[in-house]
Amino acid sequence: MTNSNLIPVFNGLIANQTVQLCNARELHQFVESKREYATWIKDRITDYGFVQDEDYIIVTERTNGRPRKEYHITLDMGKELAMVERNEKGRQVRKYFIECERRALQPQDNELLQLLMRIYCYGTQYADYQRAALGTAHNDFIGKSKLIGDFCTEGEPAQKGFLFVFTPNIEQDLQQAREIINRHVHAQHKTRSEF
């Protein structure tokens, strides 16, 4: 089993915050605890002071007609539970959870960040263009005409102006940003529907 799939980690909501979670039953199985699962999780919650809706949530699932409680726990809780097992599997899963958290802290979608920065820059550049183009004194206009020319892409006539030159780029970047945001929203909706 590779580190990338020791125990499935998924996003969920606790106190209206998106957090990474795992299923305590799967953790229990992975660390090869000799104790019965229901007793193990209840005792660990009591012994270590874990708090519902802060460290874990309870989800009721139907299996073969009978409801079954599933504990979806935060990775912090998972690390602590893994450590108290005091075995190699516990150490292994603790390191895995640390790696999952580290990856979550990195920008997940640099593409979206770059698109938003470009869109912001378009707005800033257009504001500069407007300030330059609206200069009333002749001296101001001569000095600013180079600035206006800088806003035109190579090979484009200066009279087209900034807005017409950059409009296709803005539209393309906005569409890409919408697609990325929609993917994130769809993933969040899918995660929430699992509860």
Image (cartoon, rainbow, N blue to C red):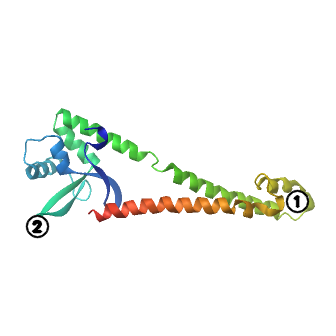
Q: Quarter-wise, where is residue 85 in the image? A: top left
**Can you give x and y, in whole percent of width and height, for residue 68 in the image?**
13, 61
Mark 2 vs mark 1: give the one in front.
2
How dense is the environment of label 2, judged by Cα within 10 Å: few (below 14), some, or many (20 and up)? few
Residue drawn at 30 percent across, 38 percent down: 3
Residue 15 seen in this snapshot: no
Q: Residue furthest bottom?
A: 65
Distance from label 2 to label 1 (Cα)? 79 Å
Mark closer to the chain start, 2 or 1: 2
What amino acid does circle 1 point to? Phe
Where's the C terminus, which quadrant? bottom left
**Can you give x and y, in whole percent of width and height, for residue 101 in the image?**
35, 44
Residue 56 seen in this snapshot: yes
Q: Nearer the viewer, residue 168 or 76?
A: 168
What amino acid does circle 2 point to? Gly
Residue drawn at 77 percent across, 51 percent down: 154
Residue under numbered circle 2: 65
Residue 40 disc label: none
Q: Nearer the viewer, residue 50 or 161?
A: 161
Residue under numbered circle 1: 141
Where's the N terminus, which quadrant? top left
**Can you give x and y, in whole percent of width and height, for residue 93 in the image?**
25, 39
Q: Quarter-wise, where is residue 116 in the image? A: bottom right
Q: Is residue 108 left or right of residue 65?
A: right
Residue drawn at 41 percent across, 46 percent down: 105
**Element type where label 1 sits in the image:** helix
